[in-house]
Image: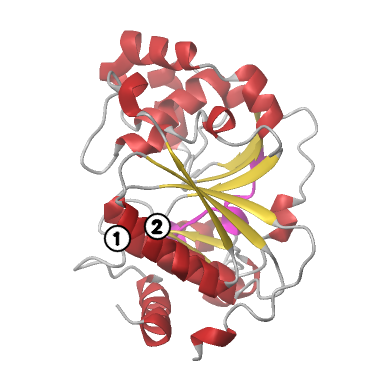
Amino acid sequence: MNRDNLGQNRLTGESINVLVTVDANYIKPLKVLLFSLQQNNRQQAFDIWLLHAGITDEALSALSNFVAQLGFTLHVIKVDMTLWDAAPTFKQYPPEMYFRLLCGAYLPATLKRVIYLDPDILVINPIKPLYDLPLTTHMMAAASHMGLTGITQTINHVRLGTKQAYFNSGVMLMDLDKMRARIHLTDILDVITKRGKELILPDQDILNFLYGEEILPLPEEIWNYDTRDNIVHFAKSLGEVDMQWVIKNTVILHFCGRPKPWEKGGMNRYAVLYQHYEQLLYHAFGD
């Protein structure tokens, strides 16, 4: 695969804005995500918006060169972490996870719409239908991981005192003007102060607690397919959503939980596909 030809088939039409928020530990998975995005959206222009707190200039320069070779444009915005000192973080949930909640404040005011993607994702089909989805009165669109019985949803309703579906924050279509008007740092910090010890998935819990009623539901099997739940999807669909269906219809594969497909032991059904993209990336760009 010739890296010089990777971005040459890109059209010059309206660009899709994609938001990512990572630290240095997730740069390699981010590259796999962006590579899969390019491979399966070859005639689509993309602007990649990276919010970060402390990635080195050297690493950012290398990432920028990589993104340019894909035919994309990278925009880097460094976020001051001082305001987030009180926010609970864990090894698997770095502070960067909060940036998506306030991305409307960090991104340029001229930017109106963006798709947020977690780095532990493969994009395996065209993503433009999501970007073009009408949000009407909703602030965002996201999917719920319902499981076979929905018991996790019930637990989250009790835990957070909510009634609507519990949405996964790993894939979100965002109306930035609505978010700028509705989402405020003081509200987020108030939840952290009052309920911080109850937050299991901190930013996702806050998203659902404060703004869940303003989120448009997306079909999870298309836009946020939890790769741990392949048996669940197969059973709920009475056998329709099998691996062949996924390859043809699913747009976003989300490798939720642990282990990740790039880690030792990360061998769920779709880990081999992930590792295939890793190998293609390596052959095109090296380590």
Helix, strand or loop for disc 1? loop
* Cα–Cα span, label 2 and label 1: 8 Å
Helix, strand or loop for disc 2? loop
| Count of numbered badges drawn on the protein | 2
Q: Look at the image and tell me whether residue 36 can be seen.
A: no
Residue 279 lies left or right of residue 45; in this view the side is left
Q: Position of residue 285 (x, y in %)?
A: 39, 81
Residue at point 77% right, 67% down? 12
Front residue of this view, candidates 157 and 171: 171
Residue at point 53% right, 32% down? 106
Q: For the stretch drawn in magenta, what is the main secondary structure?
A: helix
Residue 33 lies left or right of residue 125; in this view the side is left
The three-letter amino acid code for the residue at tag 2 is Asp
* Residue linked to disc 2: 120
Tell me if residue 9 comes above or below residue 107 in the rendering: below
Q: Look at the image and tell me whether residue 85 can be seen.
A: yes
Q: Position of residue 127 (x, y in %)?
A: 66, 61
Query: What is the magenta range?
Result: 217-231
Q: Position of residue 286 (x, y in %)?
A: 33, 82
Sort mark 2 into few (<14), some (14-19) or many (20+) by Cα contacts within 10 Å: many
* Residue linked to disc 1: 260
Which residue appears farthest toward the bottom when viewing the image? 1
Q: Position of residue 103 (x, y in %)?
A: 53, 33
Front residue of this view, candidates 111 and 221: 111
The three-letter amino acid code for the residue at tag 1 is Lys
Q: Look at the numbered discs 2 and 1 and tell me whether their residues touch, using CB distance below 8 Å.
A: yes
Residue 117 lies left or right of residue 240; in this view the side is left
Tell me if residue 63 comes above or below residue 187 in the rendering: below
Tell me if residue 110 comes above or below residue 244 in the rendering: above
Residue 53's tag is none
The quarter of the picture where the C terminus appears is bottom left
Residue at point 52% right, 74% down? 69
